[in-house]
């Protein structure tokens, strides 16, 4: 399927890198530990390939989303390639022969690249270690600022391979790896330097700020000049508010507005430091910077029989679906689950949509009073047959995992279960 092409391409490039080194091996110049040096070069080349794709995925190219199954899946691949590259760095260091005398530029670049990459990786993997925490100030934005240097260490790592004393003579293999060095470097420069010139980030204004309940903010954004390219219902944007120090962090939020609207709306629950600051500090008239839209969470690609399950603020993509409806051409059963009635949002709008569209069946559940929604109830309401249904899930990760497991046990194919994971760190 199309959504697997991206991962298969990365794996193929790694295998081709090994093949190039084997088919066009370096000249054995009789040096001591030639085999170790050869193996170290192969491992280092694989490292360059993996890091190049990590930087490419960090650039968030929208055109690549269909080949990975969405931006959230791209970030999972990014995490896997980055982790593999980190492990291979240690293998590379343990493999290549190291001398403590006669150091040249390449040796110092190796230490610089190794130290920088490992430090950033350790902050990502163990952000609560005290001495690592000081590198970021203990904040998400501090971590993002630190991560911006990863491309510099990537470049230093590749230059190290060209400037070490007595490099191996492997012209074809080195030039093959240069392709990925260029890919990684261009991706890094696009992300950190040139993205603004390609209209990756567009200026908006906060038109309105509403609080539909005591923990939720609905933000309406209007473009200052040109809007982002027309989003699809269910997609998400990255947004930050540079006029506020507390809110000048780029975070992903699902659009709750319909694609045909001339404004963007996001509905945000105050559940973390940033979203709590958003609830208390965001005001109309503030500047905003928007990037997107991203995502492949689209009910229009699903079958005729669908089940939508929203938990809490996971309602937002389904709001966008409902607001986008003209004629509903599918049979949809929509479950909206919140703990307490005062947490429910836009019930009047949801009920009005159900009245307009006879093929839409809505079930609102207050779990504190009625108990949690179970997979057995979903199957029962589907008439006992759920295998052909396309199921769309949005809510807490624990809820998504539980329903995914239950749906698979009930016979729903993995390709019929749709959700997005916003764990982009």
Image (cartoon, rainbow, N blue to C red):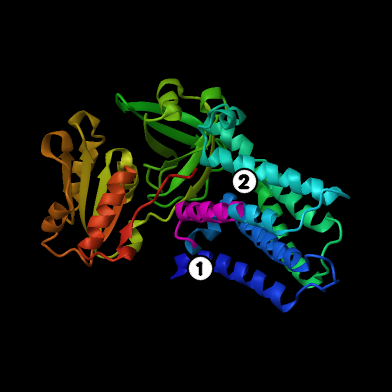
Q: Nearer the viewer, residue 397 or 320?
A: 397
Label 2: element kind: loop
Q: Where residue 276 appears, x then y in whole percent?
A: 41, 25
Q: Residue at x 80, y 70 (%)?
A: 170
Q: Where residue 224 appears, x then y in whole percent?
A: 56, 35
Mark 2 / mark 1, whichever is N-terminal: 1
Q: Nearer the viewer, residue 10 or 21?
A: 21
Which residue has dot 1 on it?
5
Location of residue 298 (image quadrant): bottom left
- Neighbour class for label 2 at 10 Å: few (<14), some, many (≥20)? few
Label 1: element kind: helix
Which residue has dot 2 on it?
199
**343 to 20, vertically: above or below:** above
State the residue lying farthest toward the bottom: 23
Q: Where residue 260 appears, x then y in whole percent?
A: 40, 48
Q: Residue at x 67, y 55 (%)?
A: 94
**348 to 390, vertically: above or below:** above
Point out the stretch of residues depicted in magenta.
68-86
Q: Nearer the viewer, residue 135 or 185?
A: 135
**191 to 249, vertically: above or below:** below
Q: Where residue 56 appears, x then y in whole percent?
A: 61, 55
The reply to whether residue 359 is visible in this rendering is yes
The reply to whether residue 244 is visible in this rendering is no
């Amino acid at each position: 399927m199309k959504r697997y092409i991206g991962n298969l391409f990365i794996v193929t490039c790694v295998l081709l890198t090994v093949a190039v080194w084997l088919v066009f091996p370096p000249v054995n110049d009789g040096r001591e530990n030639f085999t170790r040096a050869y193996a170290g070069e192969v491992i280092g080349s694989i490292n360059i390939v993996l890091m190049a794709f990590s930087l490419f995925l960090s650039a968030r190219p929208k055109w690549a989303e269909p080949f990975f199954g969405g931006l959230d899946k791209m970030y999972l691949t990014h995490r896997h390639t980055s982790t593999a590259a980190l492990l291979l760095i240690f293998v590379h260091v343990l493999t290549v022969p190291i001398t403590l005398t006669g150091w040249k530029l390449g040796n110092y670049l190796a230490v610089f690249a190794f130290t920088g990459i490992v430090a950033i990786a350790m902050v990502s993997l163990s952000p609560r270690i005290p001495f690592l925490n000081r590198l970021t100030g203990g904040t998400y934005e501090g971590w993002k600022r630190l991560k911006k240097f990863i491309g510099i260490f990537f470049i230093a790592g590749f230059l190290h391979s060209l400037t070490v004393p007595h490099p191996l003579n492997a012209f074809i293999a080195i030039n093959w790896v240069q392709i990925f060095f260029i890919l990684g470097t261009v991706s890094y420069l696009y992300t950190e330097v040139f993205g603004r010139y390609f209209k990756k980030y567009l200026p908006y204004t906060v038109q309105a700020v509403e609080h539909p309940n005591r923990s939720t903010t609905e933000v309406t954004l209007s473009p200052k000049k040109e809007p982002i390219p027309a989003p699809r219902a269910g997609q998400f944007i990255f947004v930050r508010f540079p006029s506020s120090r507390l809110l000048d962090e780029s975070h992903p939020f699902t659009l709750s507005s319909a694609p045909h609207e001339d404004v963007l709306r996001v509905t945000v629950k105050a559940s973390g430091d940033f979203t709590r600051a958003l609830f208390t500090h965001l005001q109309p008239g503030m500047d905003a910077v928007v990037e997107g839209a991203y995502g492949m969470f689209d009910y229009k690609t699903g079958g005729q029989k669908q089940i939508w399950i929203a938990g809490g603020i996971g309602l937002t993509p389904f709001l966008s679906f409902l607001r986008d409806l003209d004629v509903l051409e599918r049979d949809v059963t929509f479950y909206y689950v919140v703990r307490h009635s005062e947490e429910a949002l836009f019930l009047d709008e949801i009920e009005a949509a159900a009245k307009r569209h006879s093929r839409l069946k809505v079930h609102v559940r207050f779990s504190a009073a009625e108990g949690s929604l179970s997979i057995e109830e979903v199957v029962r309401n589907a008439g006992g047959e759920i295998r052909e249904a396309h199921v769309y899930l949005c809510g807490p990760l624990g809820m998504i995992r539980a329903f995914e497991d239950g749906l698979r046990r009930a016979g729903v194919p993995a390709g019929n279960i749709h959700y997005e994971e916003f764990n982009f760190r």
